[in-house]
Amino acid sequence: MDGYDYLIVGAGFAGAVLAERLASQLGKTCLVVDRRNHVAGNAYDYHNDAGILVHKYGPHYFRTNSDDVIDYLSQFTKWHPVHYRILSWTHGDYWPFPINLNTFEKLTGKSASSAEMVKTLERWRHDIPSPKNSKEVVLSQIGTRLYEMFFENYTRKHWKRDPSELDPSVCGRIPIRTNRDDRYLSDKFQAMPKEGYTAMFDKMLAHPNITVALNTDYQTIRKQITHKRLIYTGMIDEYFDFVYGDLPYRSLSFVPETHDLEFYQPVVQVNYPNDHDYTRIVEIKHVTGQQHSQTTIVKEYPQDFKRGREAYYPIPAPDTRERYHRYRQLADSEPNTIFLGRLATYRYYNMDQVVATALNAFNTITQNQ
Ligand code: FAD
Ligand code: UDP
Protein backbone atom coordinates (compact mmCIF):
# COMPACT_ATOMS: atom_id res chain seq x y z
CA MET A 1 0.00 0.00 0.00
CA ASP A 2 2.99 2.34 0.24
CA GLY A 3 4.34 4.77 -2.28
CA TYR A 4 1.27 6.77 -3.28
CA ASP A 5 1.34 10.56 -3.60
CA TYR A 6 -1.96 10.80 -1.74
CA LEU A 7 -3.73 8.59 0.73
CA ILE A 8 -7.44 9.45 0.66
CA VAL A 9 -9.65 8.21 3.48
CA GLY A 10 -13.28 7.85 2.32
CA ALA A 11 -14.70 7.12 -1.13
CA GLY A 12 -17.68 9.48 -0.76
CA PHE A 13 -18.05 12.75 -2.68
CA ALA A 14 -15.21 14.51 -0.85
CA GLY A 15 -12.68 11.72 -1.36
CA ALA A 16 -13.73 10.73 -4.88
CA VAL A 17 -13.71 14.28 -6.30
CA LEU A 18 -10.21 14.93 -4.96
CA ALA A 19 -8.88 11.57 -6.14
CA GLU A 20 -10.28 12.18 -9.60
CA ARG A 21 -8.87 15.72 -9.84
CA LEU A 22 -5.44 14.85 -8.45
CA ALA A 23 -5.13 11.84 -10.76
CA SER A 24 -6.47 13.32 -13.96
CA GLN A 25 -5.20 16.91 -13.68
CA LEU A 26 -1.92 16.59 -11.78
CA GLY A 27 -0.96 13.01 -12.58
CA LYS A 28 -0.79 12.09 -8.88
CA THR A 29 -1.15 8.53 -7.68
CA CYS A 30 -3.93 8.11 -5.13
CA LEU A 31 -4.89 5.30 -2.82
CA VAL A 32 -8.53 5.67 -1.74
CA VAL A 33 -9.51 3.56 1.27
CA ASP A 34 -13.01 3.05 2.60
CA ARG A 35 -14.06 0.85 5.45
CA ARG A 36 -17.35 0.07 3.78
CA ASN A 37 -17.58 -2.57 1.05
CA HIS A 38 -18.52 -0.03 -1.62
CA VAL A 39 -17.70 3.41 -3.00
CA ALA A 40 -20.01 6.49 -3.09
CA GLY A 41 -20.22 7.06 0.68
CA ASN A 42 -23.70 7.87 1.87
CA ALA A 43 -24.85 8.41 -1.71
CA TYR A 44 -24.39 4.69 -2.49
CA ASP A 45 -27.23 3.07 -4.45
CA TYR A 46 -27.66 -0.50 -5.66
CA HIS A 47 -30.20 -2.94 -7.09
CA ASN A 48 -31.73 -5.00 -4.28
CA ASP A 49 -32.79 -8.67 -4.52
CA ALA A 50 -36.00 -7.66 -6.30
CA GLY A 51 -33.97 -5.67 -8.85
CA ILE A 52 -35.12 -2.28 -7.60
CA LEU A 53 -32.62 0.58 -7.49
CA VAL A 54 -32.53 1.80 -3.88
CA HIS A 55 -30.49 4.28 -1.84
CA LYS A 56 -28.85 2.40 1.00
CA TYR A 57 -28.35 5.38 3.34
CA GLY A 58 -31.54 7.40 2.91
CA PRO A 59 -32.83 9.38 -0.05
CA HIS A 60 -30.26 11.41 -1.95
CA TYR A 61 -31.93 14.16 -3.96
CA PHE A 62 -29.32 15.89 -6.06
CA ARG A 63 -29.79 19.63 -6.39
CA THR A 64 -27.53 22.63 -6.86
CA ASN A 65 -27.30 26.25 -7.91
CA SER A 66 -23.66 25.88 -8.93
CA ASP A 67 -22.78 25.67 -12.63
CA ASP A 68 -19.27 24.54 -11.69
CA VAL A 69 -20.66 21.55 -9.79
CA ILE A 70 -23.04 20.62 -12.63
CA ASP A 71 -20.27 20.92 -15.24
CA TYR A 72 -17.89 18.87 -13.15
CA LEU A 73 -20.24 15.97 -12.39
CA SER A 74 -21.67 15.95 -15.92
CA GLN A 75 -18.34 14.51 -17.09
CA PHE A 76 -19.30 11.30 -15.29
CA THR A 77 -23.06 11.05 -15.68
CA LYS A 78 -26.09 12.00 -17.71
CA TRP A 79 -29.03 13.32 -15.70
CA HIS A 80 -32.64 12.33 -15.13
CA PRO A 81 -34.49 15.62 -14.35
CA VAL A 82 -36.90 15.29 -11.44
CA HIS A 83 -39.44 17.14 -9.39
CA TYR A 84 -39.05 16.03 -5.77
CA ARG A 85 -42.59 16.07 -4.33
CA ILE A 86 -43.14 15.39 -0.67
CA LEU A 87 -46.20 15.15 1.56
CA SER A 88 -46.54 15.37 5.30
CA TRP A 89 -48.92 12.98 7.06
CA THR A 90 -50.59 14.44 10.14
CA HIS A 91 -54.04 14.83 11.68
CA GLY A 92 -55.13 11.75 9.68
CA ASP A 93 -54.38 13.18 6.25
CA TYR A 94 -51.73 14.03 3.65
CA TRP A 95 -50.66 17.67 3.57
CA PRO A 96 -48.72 19.46 0.81
CA PHE A 97 -45.21 20.08 2.16
CA PRO A 98 -43.21 22.30 2.29
CA ILE A 99 -45.93 24.69 3.34
CA ASN A 100 -47.38 26.50 0.32
CA LEU A 101 -50.68 28.01 -0.80
CA ASN A 102 -52.24 24.54 -1.20
CA THR A 103 -51.36 23.68 2.42
CA PHE A 104 -52.85 26.96 3.57
CA GLU A 105 -56.10 26.37 1.68
CA LYS A 106 -56.41 22.88 3.12
CA LEU A 107 -55.90 24.24 6.62
CA THR A 108 -58.40 27.07 6.31
CA GLY A 109 -60.87 25.02 4.24
CA LYS A 110 -61.36 27.69 1.57
CA SER A 111 -59.61 28.90 -1.55
CA ALA A 112 -57.21 31.79 -1.14
CA SER A 113 -54.84 33.99 -3.10
CA SER A 114 -51.14 34.38 -2.38
CA ALA A 115 -51.85 37.87 -1.08
CA GLU A 116 -54.40 36.48 1.39
CA MET A 117 -51.93 33.88 2.61
CA VAL A 118 -49.24 36.53 3.06
CA LYS A 119 -51.68 38.68 5.03
CA THR A 120 -52.71 35.83 7.31
CA LEU A 121 -49.11 34.74 7.93
CA GLU A 122 -48.37 38.34 8.90
CA ARG A 123 -50.93 37.90 11.70
CA TRP A 124 -49.73 34.42 12.70
CA ARG A 125 -45.99 34.95 12.59
CA HIS A 126 -44.10 36.03 15.68
CA ASP A 127 -42.15 39.22 15.59
CA ILE A 128 -38.59 37.89 15.94
CA PRO A 129 -36.25 40.14 13.95
CA SER A 130 -33.15 37.89 14.12
CA PRO A 131 -34.08 34.29 14.90
CA LYS A 132 -31.41 32.60 16.99
CA ASN A 133 -32.53 28.98 16.64
CA SER A 134 -34.76 26.65 14.60
CA LYS A 135 -37.85 27.27 16.73
CA GLU A 136 -37.58 31.03 16.33
CA VAL A 137 -36.90 30.80 12.61
CA VAL A 138 -40.12 28.84 12.02
CA LEU A 139 -42.23 30.90 14.43
CA SER A 140 -40.97 34.08 12.76
CA GLN A 141 -42.27 32.86 9.40
CA ILE A 142 -45.49 30.96 10.11
CA GLY A 143 -46.44 31.12 13.81
CA THR A 144 -47.27 28.51 16.44
CA ARG A 145 -50.04 26.47 14.81
CA LEU A 146 -48.11 25.44 11.69
CA TYR A 147 -44.90 25.07 13.71
CA GLU A 148 -46.60 22.56 15.99
CA MET A 149 -48.25 20.70 13.12
CA PHE A 150 -45.20 20.19 10.94
CA PHE A 151 -41.92 21.06 12.66
CA GLU A 152 -41.86 20.66 16.41
CA ASN A 153 -42.24 16.91 16.78
CA TYR A 154 -40.48 15.91 13.56
CA THR A 155 -37.43 17.83 14.74
CA ARG A 156 -37.55 16.38 18.24
CA LYS A 157 -37.88 12.88 16.81
CA HIS A 158 -35.01 13.28 14.33
CA TRP A 159 -32.50 15.24 16.45
CA LYS A 160 -33.65 14.30 19.98
CA ARG A 161 -33.43 18.00 20.70
CA ASP A 162 -35.98 20.74 20.84
CA PRO A 163 -35.85 23.04 17.77
CA SER A 164 -34.84 25.83 20.17
CA GLU A 165 -31.55 23.95 20.70
CA LEU A 166 -30.62 23.80 17.00
CA ASP A 167 -29.17 26.40 14.63
CA PRO A 168 -31.73 28.40 12.59
CA SER A 169 -30.33 26.77 9.42
CA VAL A 170 -31.74 23.32 10.34
CA CYS A 171 -35.46 24.09 10.02
CA GLY A 172 -34.64 27.22 8.05
CA ARG A 173 -33.56 25.09 5.09
CA ILE A 174 -37.19 24.08 4.48
CA PRO A 175 -38.78 26.75 2.29
CA ILE A 176 -42.12 28.38 3.18
CA ARG A 177 -43.95 29.45 0.04
CA THR A 178 -47.02 31.55 -0.55
CA ASN A 179 -47.48 30.33 -4.15
CA ARG A 180 -48.37 26.85 -5.45
CA ASP A 181 -44.78 25.69 -6.01
CA ASP A 182 -44.81 22.37 -4.15
CA ARG A 183 -41.24 21.22 -4.91
CA TYR A 184 -39.33 20.21 -1.79
CA LEU A 185 -36.23 22.05 -2.93
CA SER A 186 -35.72 25.43 -4.56
CA ASP A 187 -32.37 25.02 -6.36
CA LYS A 188 -32.26 25.72 -10.10
CA PHE A 189 -30.87 22.28 -11.00
CA GLN A 190 -32.69 19.23 -9.62
CA ALA A 191 -31.88 15.86 -11.17
CA MET A 192 -30.67 12.36 -10.39
CA PRO A 193 -27.63 10.74 -12.03
CA LYS A 194 -29.23 8.80 -14.87
CA GLU A 195 -27.67 5.43 -14.03
CA GLY A 196 -27.50 6.15 -10.29
CA TYR A 197 -24.82 7.49 -7.94
CA THR A 198 -22.64 4.40 -7.74
CA ALA A 199 -22.29 4.25 -11.52
CA MET A 200 -21.20 7.90 -11.47
CA PHE A 201 -18.61 7.20 -8.77
CA ASP A 202 -17.28 4.18 -10.66
CA LYS A 203 -16.54 6.49 -13.60
CA MET A 204 -14.90 9.11 -11.37
CA LEU A 205 -12.62 6.55 -9.79
CA ALA A 206 -11.75 4.66 -13.00
CA HIS A 207 -8.53 6.60 -13.66
CA PRO A 208 -5.43 4.35 -13.81
CA ASN A 209 -3.65 6.49 -11.17
CA ILE A 210 -6.38 5.67 -8.63
CA THR A 211 -6.40 2.51 -6.53
CA VAL A 212 -9.46 1.82 -4.38
CA ALA A 213 -9.17 -0.43 -1.32
CA LEU A 214 -12.56 -1.31 0.18
CA ASN A 215 -13.17 -2.94 3.58
CA THR A 216 -10.09 -1.04 4.69
CA ASP A 217 -10.24 1.02 7.86
CA TYR A 218 -7.73 3.82 8.12
CA GLN A 219 -7.66 3.36 11.89
CA THR A 220 -6.18 -0.11 11.48
CA ILE A 221 -3.73 0.67 8.67
CA ARG A 222 -2.57 4.14 9.67
CA LYS A 223 0.56 3.01 11.46
CA GLN A 224 1.55 0.56 8.73
CA ILE A 225 1.62 2.80 5.69
CA THR A 226 3.55 5.84 4.62
CA HIS A 227 2.15 8.54 2.38
CA LYS A 228 3.19 11.98 1.26
CA ARG A 229 -0.14 13.70 1.84
CA LEU A 230 -3.40 12.68 3.41
CA ILE A 231 -6.97 13.69 2.55
CA TYR A 232 -9.20 12.65 5.43
CA THR A 233 -13.01 12.60 5.11
CA GLY A 234 -13.99 10.49 8.14
CA MET A 235 -15.02 11.64 11.63
CA ILE A 236 -12.62 14.26 12.93
CA ASP A 237 -12.90 13.13 16.57
CA GLU A 238 -11.99 9.57 15.58
CA TYR A 239 -8.93 10.81 13.68
CA PHE A 240 -7.65 12.40 16.89
CA ASP A 241 -8.48 9.33 18.99
CA PHE A 242 -11.31 11.21 20.74
CA VAL A 243 -8.84 13.21 22.83
CA TYR A 244 -11.49 15.83 23.57
CA GLY A 245 -14.29 13.31 23.92
CA ASP A 246 -16.87 12.10 21.37
CA LEU A 247 -18.55 14.68 19.17
CA PRO A 248 -22.31 14.27 19.08
CA TYR A 249 -23.97 12.89 15.93
CA ARG A 250 -27.37 11.50 15.05
CA SER A 251 -27.72 8.07 13.53
CA LEU A 252 -30.55 6.33 11.69
CA SER A 253 -31.86 2.85 11.11
CA PHE A 254 -33.26 2.13 7.63
CA VAL A 255 -35.96 -0.53 7.40
CA PRO A 256 -36.82 -1.58 3.81
CA GLU A 257 -39.98 -3.35 2.66
CA THR A 258 -40.66 -4.61 -0.85
CA HIS A 259 -44.27 -4.67 -2.05
CA ASP A 260 -46.00 -6.27 -5.03
CA LEU A 261 -47.30 -2.92 -6.17
CA GLU A 262 -46.11 -0.54 -8.81
CA PHE A 263 -46.17 2.27 -6.25
CA TYR A 264 -46.87 2.18 -2.51
CA GLN A 265 -47.43 5.86 -1.73
CA PRO A 266 -48.39 8.90 -3.81
CA VAL A 267 -44.98 10.63 -3.79
CA VAL A 268 -41.30 9.87 -3.22
CA GLN A 269 -41.33 10.88 0.45
CA VAL A 270 -43.98 11.11 3.14
CA ASN A 271 -42.97 12.78 6.41
CA TYR A 272 -44.54 11.72 9.70
CA PRO A 273 -44.09 14.59 12.15
CA ASN A 274 -46.64 13.42 14.72
CA ASP A 275 -47.27 9.70 14.12
CA HIS A 276 -45.02 6.63 14.40
CA ASP A 277 -41.42 6.27 15.55
CA TYR A 278 -40.08 6.76 12.04
CA THR A 279 -39.70 10.24 10.55
CA ARG A 280 -40.35 9.41 6.93
CA ILE A 281 -41.12 6.73 4.36
CA VAL A 282 -39.15 7.01 1.15
CA GLU A 283 -40.05 5.30 -2.11
CA ILE A 284 -37.10 6.29 -4.26
CA LYS A 285 -38.50 4.59 -7.39
CA HIS A 286 -40.64 7.72 -7.87
CA VAL A 287 -37.52 9.68 -8.82
CA THR A 288 -35.05 7.18 -10.27
CA GLY A 289 -37.15 6.70 -13.37
CA GLN A 290 -36.98 2.91 -13.07
CA GLN A 291 -39.87 0.86 -14.46
CA HIS A 292 -40.62 -2.19 -12.28
CA SER A 293 -43.75 -4.08 -11.29
CA GLN A 294 -42.69 -4.08 -7.61
CA THR A 295 -41.55 -1.31 -5.33
CA THR A 296 -39.33 -0.88 -2.27
CA ILE A 297 -40.04 1.60 0.52
CA VAL A 298 -37.72 2.49 3.38
CA LYS A 299 -38.82 3.61 6.85
CA GLU A 300 -36.29 5.86 8.59
CA TYR A 301 -35.95 5.54 12.36
CA PRO A 302 -33.77 8.08 14.16
CA GLN A 303 -31.20 6.54 16.48
CA ASP A 304 -28.73 7.72 19.06
CA PHE A 305 -25.19 7.59 17.81
CA LYS A 306 -22.61 5.50 19.59
CA ARG A 307 -19.27 4.17 18.41
CA GLY A 308 -19.79 1.39 15.89
CA ARG A 309 -22.95 2.96 14.41
CA GLU A 310 -22.93 5.24 11.39
CA ALA A 311 -22.58 8.95 12.19
CA TYR A 312 -25.04 10.29 9.67
CA TYR A 313 -25.65 13.80 10.93
CA PRO A 314 -23.37 16.27 12.70
CA ILE A 315 -25.65 18.28 14.99
CA PRO A 316 -25.73 21.97 14.04
CA ALA A 317 -25.90 23.88 17.33
CA PRO A 318 -23.76 26.33 19.32
CA ASP A 319 -22.66 23.78 21.96
CA THR A 320 -21.60 21.13 19.42
CA ARG A 321 -19.77 23.73 17.34
CA GLU A 322 -17.74 24.70 20.36
CA ARG A 323 -16.73 21.08 20.89
CA TYR A 324 -15.86 20.69 17.22
CA HIS A 325 -13.74 23.85 17.34
CA ARG A 326 -11.21 22.20 19.66
CA TYR A 327 -10.72 19.42 17.13
CA ARG A 328 -10.55 21.99 14.32
CA GLN A 329 -7.59 23.63 16.02
CA LEU A 330 -5.78 20.30 16.11
CA ALA A 331 -6.65 19.72 12.45
CA ASP A 332 -5.26 23.12 11.45
CA SER A 333 -1.83 22.18 12.72
CA GLU A 334 -1.77 18.64 11.34
CA PRO A 335 1.02 18.51 8.73
CA ASN A 336 0.32 17.48 5.10
CA THR A 337 -3.31 16.66 5.85
CA ILE A 338 -6.55 18.10 4.50
CA PHE A 339 -9.81 17.51 6.39
CA LEU A 340 -12.76 17.57 4.04
CA GLY A 341 -16.44 16.68 3.82
CA ARG A 342 -19.38 16.26 6.16
CA LEU A 343 -17.72 14.31 8.95
CA ALA A 344 -14.21 15.78 8.91
CA THR A 345 -15.47 19.38 9.01
CA TYR A 346 -18.57 18.56 11.10
CA ARG A 347 -20.94 20.36 8.74
CA TYR A 348 -24.51 19.49 7.68
CA TYR A 349 -23.50 19.67 4.00
CA ASN A 350 -25.52 18.59 0.97
CA MET A 351 -23.77 16.65 -1.79
CA ASP A 352 -23.26 19.65 -4.06
CA GLN A 353 -21.69 21.63 -1.23
CA VAL A 354 -19.23 18.80 -0.61
CA VAL A 355 -18.36 18.70 -4.32
CA ALA A 356 -17.83 22.47 -4.29
CA THR A 357 -15.54 22.35 -1.24
CA ALA A 358 -13.56 19.48 -2.77
CA LEU A 359 -13.09 21.42 -6.02
CA ASN A 360 -11.95 24.45 -3.98
CA ALA A 361 -9.51 22.30 -2.03
CA PHE A 362 -8.11 21.02 -5.32
CA ASN A 363 -7.63 24.59 -6.59
CA THR A 364 -5.73 25.43 -3.41
CA ILE A 365 -3.50 22.37 -3.85
CA THR A 366 -2.82 23.40 -7.46
CA GLN A 367 -1.90 26.96 -6.44
CA ASN A 368 0.48 25.71 -3.75
CA GLN A 369 2.25 23.22 -6.03
P1 FAD B 1 -19.61 10.42 3.17
O1 FAD B 1 -20.53 10.24 2.03
O2 FAD B 1 -20.10 10.11 4.54
O3 FAD B 1 -18.30 9.57 2.88
C1 FAD B 1 -17.30 9.37 3.85
C2 FAD B 1 -16.75 7.97 3.64
O4 FAD B 1 -15.61 7.82 4.49
C3 FAD B 1 -17.71 6.86 4.03
O5 FAD B 1 -17.92 6.01 2.94
C4 FAD B 1 -17.03 6.16 5.18
O6 FAD B 1 -17.23 4.75 5.18
C5 FAD B 1 -15.58 6.50 4.97
N1 FAD B 1 -14.77 6.46 6.19
C6 FAD B 1 -14.99 7.15 7.33
N2 FAD B 1 -14.04 6.86 8.23
C7 FAD B 1 -13.21 5.96 7.64
C8 FAD B 1 -12.05 5.27 8.08
N3 FAD B 1 -11.53 5.44 9.31
N4 FAD B 1 -11.45 4.42 7.21
C9 FAD B 1 -11.94 4.23 5.98
N5 FAD B 1 -13.04 4.86 5.52
C10 FAD B 1 -13.67 5.71 6.35
N6 FAD B 1 -27.35 15.45 0.36
C11 FAD B 1 -28.02 15.99 -0.69
O7 FAD B 1 -27.46 16.81 -1.42
N7 FAD B 1 -29.32 15.62 -0.94
C12 FAD B 1 -29.99 14.72 -0.17
O8 FAD B 1 -31.16 14.43 -0.44
C13 FAD B 1 -29.30 14.15 0.94
N8 FAD B 1 -29.94 13.25 1.73
C14 FAD B 1 -29.26 12.69 2.77
C15 FAD B 1 -29.94 11.75 3.55
C16 FAD B 1 -29.28 11.15 4.62
C17 FAD B 1 -30.01 10.15 5.45
C18 FAD B 1 -27.93 11.50 4.90
C19 FAD B 1 -27.21 10.87 6.06
C20 FAD B 1 -27.26 12.44 4.12
C21 FAD B 1 -27.92 13.04 3.05
N9 FAD B 1 -27.28 13.97 2.23
C22 FAD B 1 -27.96 14.53 1.18
C23 FAD B 1 -25.90 14.41 2.50
C24 FAD B 1 -24.87 13.62 1.70
O9 FAD B 1 -24.92 12.26 2.08
C25 FAD B 1 -23.50 14.20 2.03
O10 FAD B 1 -23.43 15.58 1.75
C26 FAD B 1 -22.38 13.54 1.25
O11 FAD B 1 -22.55 12.16 1.09
C27 FAD B 1 -21.10 13.80 2.03
O12 FAD B 1 -20.00 13.28 1.35
P2 FAD B 1 -18.68 13.02 2.18
O13 FAD B 1 -17.67 12.51 1.20
O14 FAD B 1 -18.33 14.20 2.99
O15 FAD B 1 -19.06 11.90 3.25
N1 UDP C 1 -38.20 19.22 9.29
C1 UDP C 1 -39.37 19.22 10.03
N2 UDP C 1 -40.49 18.65 9.47
C2 UDP C 1 -40.49 18.09 8.25
C3 UDP C 1 -39.28 18.10 7.51
C4 UDP C 1 -38.16 18.67 8.06
O1 UDP C 1 -39.40 19.69 11.15
O2 UDP C 1 -41.54 17.58 7.80
C5 UDP C 1 -36.99 19.82 9.91
C6 UDP C 1 -36.20 18.77 10.70
O3 UDP C 1 -35.56 19.40 11.78
C7 UDP C 1 -35.20 18.30 9.66
C8 UDP C 1 -34.86 19.61 8.97
O4 UDP C 1 -36.11 20.31 8.90
O5 UDP C 1 -34.08 17.68 10.24
C9 UDP C 1 -34.28 19.47 7.59
O6 UDP C 1 -35.13 18.64 6.84
P1 UDP C 1 -34.62 17.86 5.54
O7 UDP C 1 -35.78 17.14 4.96
O8 UDP C 1 -33.89 18.80 4.67
O9 UDP C 1 -33.61 16.84 6.22
P2 UDP C 1 -32.62 15.72 5.67
O10 UDP C 1 -33.16 15.23 4.36
O11 UDP C 1 -31.28 16.38 5.58
O12 UDP C 1 -32.68 14.70 6.75
Image (cartoon, rainbow, N blue to C red):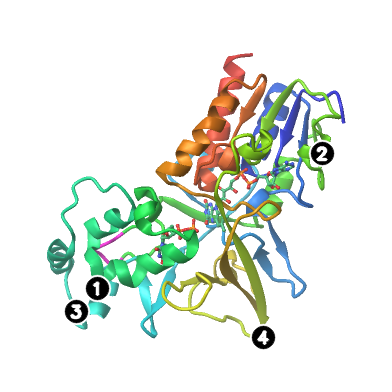
Q: Which mark is residue 111?
A: 3
Residue 368 in percent (x, y) is at 60, 14
| Residue 230 colored in magenta in the image | no
Q: Which residue is mark 2?
A: 220
Mark 2: amino acid: Thr
Q: Residue at x 81, y 46 (%)?
A: 214
Q: Left or right? Give the position of 345 relative to 132.
A: right
**Stretch of the chain drawn in magenta:** 176-180
Q: Which residue is mark 4?
A: 260
Secondary structure at numbered mark 3: loop
Dividing the image into 4 quarters, which one contains the N terminus?
top right
Residues under numbered marks 3 and 4 in contact, where contact means CB atoms less than 8 Å apart = no
Q: Which residue is mark 1?
A: 104
Mark 3: amino acid: Ser
Q: Quadrant of residue 107?
A: bottom left
Secondary structure at numbered mark 1: helix
Secondary structure at numbered mark 4: loop
Q: Nearer the viewer, mark 1 or mark 3?
A: 1
Residue 75 against residue 251 in the figure, above or below: above
Residue 70 in percent (x, y) is at 52, 43
Residues under numbered marks 4 and 2 in contact, where contact means CB atoms less than 8 Å apart = no
Residue toward you, 209 or 297: 297
